[in-house]
């Protein structure tokens, strides 16, 4: 920016709405704002490092601007954060969070955008016929931004279009931020520009009654998370309002600790309990269920912490490993899929595997079909993400 190297700070939770850019000096100043240094301490650090006295009023102005933009953990920020949590807790519906940013905010424009994913050269087309021969029981769909992964979403949701009898969706979404617990439930409807995806409150209440933990404690994690929101948008596009479908939104936290303990998810009590509770609740509340994982695959390159890349050669290796992983997924082998991740400590950063694990585990003897595998890569910026769509029958 203006010939300077800059560091961009962005809040992935969206509490600070706008990114900010810091030059080298400001990075130095902000790095010392860790709660242990006073402004006098920081001023002294600047003198020791640069030999110059930086005016206190200028430091105070930096603090004021950072606080105003919600980048400081200050009393003002805590008041703001607590009011947001209370507002979300009291709401009956989860408002759209990414409309107008990740996808079109107006209903007509959004419908055209989604239609374009089906008619895209890599899309599945818009003409499909009902396929009653084998019930659709599960889907894996991406959660990458629509403009990068649109055709792959279309492949997943075309499969749903071919099975118009499905009217209940258990949505396992990848949670990209830390949670206190392994799962987060909400009984809120998900608003979309195409109309709300209604929560199955009776199912959610019965499910919660079977669980020892109160998984509503992390409900606020749903507010800014996109992995379920994007599925709700696609469901509203594919499912006519007359179908009367309902959703059960469940965010899944990290399984990294399980990898590090050299255990499997089936050995973790809260994972076993959630799988059993979902299956039992489905049995007690008969409907045409489809379990959906909002899940991406590999995240590789400098932007994600690799020392170099990605390159065309490294992406071929990633595809080889991804396809081996997907063979296990398609075969319904949840434990084998997890072991494949744990073997190299999730070297490819497959962020969606916990949601995929839960989907496979909650389905009885799933038989899958890979619909599409794709990669999005920006070799110049040093980032690549891979994703796929899979249907289970």
Image (tube, grey):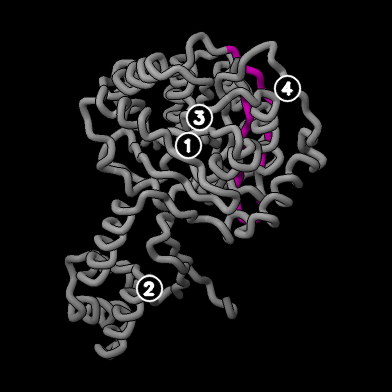
Q: Magenta part of the protein: which range?
A: 367-390
277 vs 376: above or below: above
The tag on residue 69 is 2
Q: Residues within 10 Å of mark 4 (few under 14, many from 20)?
A: few
Residue at (51% x, 9% y) in the render = 365
Spot occupied by residue 176 in the image (x, y as percentages of width and height): 42, 44
Q: Position of 61 compared to 115: left or right?
A: left
Spot occupied by residue 335 in the image (x, y as percentages of width and height): 44, 15
Q: Residues within 10 Å of mark 1 (few under 14, many from 20)?
A: many
The residues bearing labels 1 and 4 have C-alpha atoms spaced at a distance of 33 Å
Residue at the spot of label 1: 351
Residue at the spot of label 3: 169
Q: Determine which quarter of the picture holds residue 205.
A: top left
Residue at (32% x, 67% y) in the render = 31
Foreground disc of the pair 1, 4: 4
Give the overall secondary structure of the magenta segment: strand
Residue at the spot of label 4: 130
First of labels 1, 4 by sequence position? 4
Asked if labels 1 and 3 touch by Cβ distance under 8 angstroms, the answer is no
């Amino acid at each position: 920016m203006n010939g300077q190297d800059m560091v961009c700070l962005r809040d992935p939770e969206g509490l600070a709405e706008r990114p900010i850019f810091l030059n080298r000096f400001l990075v130095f100043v902000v790095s010392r704002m860790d709660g242990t240094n006073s402004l006098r301490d920081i001023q002294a650090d600047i003198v020791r490092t640069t030999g110059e006295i930086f005016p206190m009023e200028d430091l105070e102005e930096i603090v004021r601007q950072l606080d105003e933009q919600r980048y400081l953990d200050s009393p003002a920020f805590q008041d703001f954060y607590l009011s947001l949590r209370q507002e979300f807790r009291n709401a009956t519906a989860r408002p759209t969070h990414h409309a107008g940013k990740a996808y079109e905010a107006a209903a007509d424009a959004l419908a055209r955008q989604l239609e374009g994913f089906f008619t895209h050269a890599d899309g599945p087309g818009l003409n499909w016929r009902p396929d009653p021969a084998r019930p659709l029981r599960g889907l894996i769909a991406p959660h990458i931004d629509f403009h990068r992964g649109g055709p792959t979403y279309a492949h997943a949701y075309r499969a749903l279009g071919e099975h118009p009898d499905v009217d209940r969706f258990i949505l396992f979404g990848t949670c990209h931020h830390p949670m206190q617990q392994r799962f987060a439930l909400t009984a809120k409807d998900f608003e979309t520009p195409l109309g709300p995806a209604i929560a199955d409150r009776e199912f959610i209440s019965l499910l919660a009654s079977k669980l020892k933990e109160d998984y509503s404690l992390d409900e606020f994690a749903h507010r800014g998370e996109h992995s379920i929101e994007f599925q709700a948008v696609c469901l509203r596009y594919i499912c006519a309002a007359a179908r009367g479908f309902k959703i059960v939104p469940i965010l899944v936290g990290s399984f990294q600790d399980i990898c590090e303990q050299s255990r499997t998810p089936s050995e973790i009590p809260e994972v076993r309990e959630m799988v059993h509770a979902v299956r039992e609740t489905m049995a007690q509340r008969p409907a045409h269920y489809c379990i959906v994982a909002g899940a991406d695959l590999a995240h590789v390159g400098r932007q994600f912490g690799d020392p170099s890349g990605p390159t065309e050669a490294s992406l071929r290796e990633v595809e080889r490993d991804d396809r081996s992983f997907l063979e296990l997924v398609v075969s319904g082998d949840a434990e084998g899929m997890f072991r494949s991740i744990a073997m190299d400590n999730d070297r490819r950063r497959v962020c969606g595997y916990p949601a995929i694990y839960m989907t496979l585990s909650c389905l009885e003897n799933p038989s899958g079909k890979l619909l599409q595998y794709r990669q999005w890569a920006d070799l110049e910026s040093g980032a690549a993400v891979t994703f796929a769509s899979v249907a289970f029958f």
